[in-house]
């Protein structure tokens, strides 16, 4: 039963409101002033507080300071609707003008109960799940993750470029967001662009914008994503995939603080902080002539290296529990836990797709679970350390990461599309295609339509 506190000095209104809400199954308490309400009750224990704006002593607005997390509805006369709007700005959830209609009031209370509960749940979830970690939402306690947290704390407030290194799915975007949120640009935009996801022929226009008629199809003038990040942070994921002409334009942005749209003759000032990420060896790309060395030196001022999930020791289990709780709550499933065997398997499996693969495996398990316990089968994990995955193959612990990758693809490619396979591995389709080429893993014939 939801609890409501009414603070209203006019007895008739207070009593009528109490009766109305009690008839609709609310547990109701009331007081004629904020002071008396505070003396008699713990204000933060209510689901909803309805307070009159004008009261003897403290005004109804005071409630929002005394009970900050509680959904508050301010009651006001027609004459003071303007102050009610002020109350909303101070954090009131809603306001009701007197004399009010009963249905309207009940609707407002119902909505407030729901929103207040959601807000409390979210706050509790956040506090619960990411407690004790230096950056909320990033789980990690192992030495390499501690180093990551230290780096975030040191470089976030500066304006230097940051290069985040790590395999696919290790949390590079998460770190980029943490850097932005802890910088003086936090109120500005953060624009995230995955360079591997945009075809080479479009990337310059997407990033830098274009003038009308700059190329066939450029019917109007368009602002690019770099300009959209003005005053904020530009996050370029998979920067190693950026074609050379776009690299030249980006260098100009970093060196001169200027951007020139495709087809434009004049430049514009632009103020962005660059955070770049890659899973590739940029030094090698420079050596191969695929990445400009001057750009490399510009973006490689400060590095943050994210360890692969298999290098994080017990963090894997903490992360899995965090993700499991987050997922069953999101999917509105009953609480679930891992079996002992699953916990063992979690730390033995090498997670080539890192946290994203773990996240996907957990989501699959939550959807398939029909008891409270998650078994290795539900997560499609090999359930015994010494169990050969196929007769004649090497046993699980001896497999290299590439062997795992090959085995995973060969095992699942007949039942999954390339897009699904890439998603489960936590890599882009392009990365899957590249790995197939490099490791010589043939694609099944019947799937060629999915190209
Ligand atoms: N330490 C962590 N704690 C909690 N969640 C994490 C952590 N690391 C990664 N995740 C989650 O894993 C998923 C993948 O992370 P993210 O997208 O940041 O990886 P990425 O390295 O940018 O991947 P890619 O290189 O493929 O773009 C996200 O949903 C992210 O929230």
Image (spheres, helix red, strand yellow):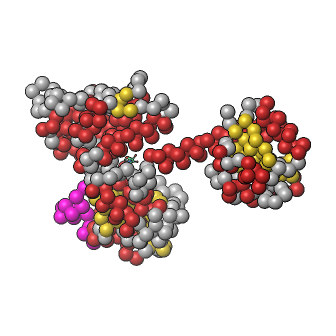
Q: Which of 413 and 61 is in front in this view?
A: 61
Q: Is residue 292 magenta?
A: yes
The extreme bottom residue here reads 256
Please, is residue 423 above or below residue 380 in the view?
below
Asked whether residue 194 is in view, the answer is: no
Q: Picture quarter containing residue 149?
A: bottom left
Residue ranking furthest to the right: 12
Where residue 309 appears, x then y in whole percent?
A: 28, 47
Left or right of 344 on screen, residue 67: right
Quarter containing the C terminus: top left
In this picture, is 215 found above or below 11? below
Residue drawn at point x = 43 percent, y = 49 percent: 130
* 105 vs 210, nearest the viewer: 105
Q: In this view, does 22 lie to the left or right of 148?
A: right
Q: In this rendering, would 136 be left or right of 352?
A: right
Q: Which of 60 and 279 is in front in this view?
A: 60
Q: Where is residue 347 in the image (x, y as percent from the top left)?
A: 25, 40
The residue sitting at the front extreme is 39
Whole-percent x, y for residue 258 in the image: 44, 73
Count of numbered labels shown in the rendering: 0
Residues in magenta, as a range: 279-294
Relative to 375, residue 14 above or below: below
Residue 346 in percent (x, y) is at: 28, 37
Quadrant where the N terminus is found in the figure: top right
* Residue 323 in sight in this render: yes
| Residue at 74%, 44% in the rendered image | 5
x 64%, y 54%: residue: 68
The reply to whether the magenta stretch includes residue 256 is no
Q: Residue at x 72, y 41 (%)?
A: 4
Task: Pick out the residue farthest to the left.
Answer: 392
């Amino acid at each position: 039963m939801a609890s409501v506190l009414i603070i209203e000095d006019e007895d008739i209104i207070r009593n009528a409101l109490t009766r109305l809400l009690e008839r609709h199954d609310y547990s109701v308490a009331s007081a004629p002033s904020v002071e008396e309400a505070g003396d008699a009750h713990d204000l933060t224990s209510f689901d909803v507080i309805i307070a009159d704006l004008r009261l003897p002593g403290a005004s109804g607005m005071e409630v929002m300071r005394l009970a900050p997390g509680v959904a508050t509805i301010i009651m006001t006369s027609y004459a003071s609707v303007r102050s009610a709007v002020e109350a909303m700005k101070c954090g009131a959830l809603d306001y009701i003008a007197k004399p009010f209609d009963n249905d309207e009031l009940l609707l407002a209370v119902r909505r407030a109960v729901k929103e207040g509960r959601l807000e409390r749940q979210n706050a509790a979830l956040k506090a619960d799940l990411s407690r004790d970690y230096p950056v909320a939402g990033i789980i990690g306690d192992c030495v390499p993750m501690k180093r990551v947290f230290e780096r975030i704390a040191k470089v976030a407030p500066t304006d230097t470029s940051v290069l985040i290194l790590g395999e696919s799915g290790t949390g590079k975007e998460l770190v980029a967001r943490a850097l932005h949120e802890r910088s003086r640009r936090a109120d500005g935009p953060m624009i995230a662009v995955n360079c591997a996801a945009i075809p080479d022929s479009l990337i310059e226009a997407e990033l830098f914008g274009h003038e009308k008629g700059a190329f066939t199809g450029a019917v109007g003038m368009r602002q690019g994503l770099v300009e959209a990040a003005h005053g904020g942070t530009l996050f370029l994921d998979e920067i190693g995939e950026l074609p050379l002409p776009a690299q030249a334009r980006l260098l100009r942005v970093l060196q001169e603080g200027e951007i020139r749209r495709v087809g434009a003759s004049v430049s514009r000032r632009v103020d962005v902080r660059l955070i770049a990420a890659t899973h590739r060896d940029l030094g090698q790309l420079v050596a191969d002539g695929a990445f400009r060395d001057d750009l490399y030196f510009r973006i490689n001022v400060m590095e943050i290296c994210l360890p692969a999930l298999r290098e994080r020791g017990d963090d894997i289990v903490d992360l899995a529990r965090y993700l499991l709780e987050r997922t069953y709550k999101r999917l509105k499933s009953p609480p679930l836990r891992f079996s002992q065997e699953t916990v063992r398997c979690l730390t033995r499996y090498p997670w080539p797709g890192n946290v994203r693969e773990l996240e996907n495996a957990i989501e699959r398990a939550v959807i398939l679970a029909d008891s409270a316990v998650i078994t290795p089968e539900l997560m499609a994990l090999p359930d015994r350390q010494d169990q050969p995955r196929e007769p004649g193959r090497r046993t699980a612990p001896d497999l290299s990461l590439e062997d795992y990758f090959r085995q995973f693809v060969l095992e699942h490619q007949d039942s999954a599309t390339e897009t699904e396979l890439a998603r489960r591995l936590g890599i882009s389709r392009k990365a899957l295609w590249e790995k197939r080429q490099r490791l010589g893993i043939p694609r099944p014939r019947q799937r060629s339509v999915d190209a």
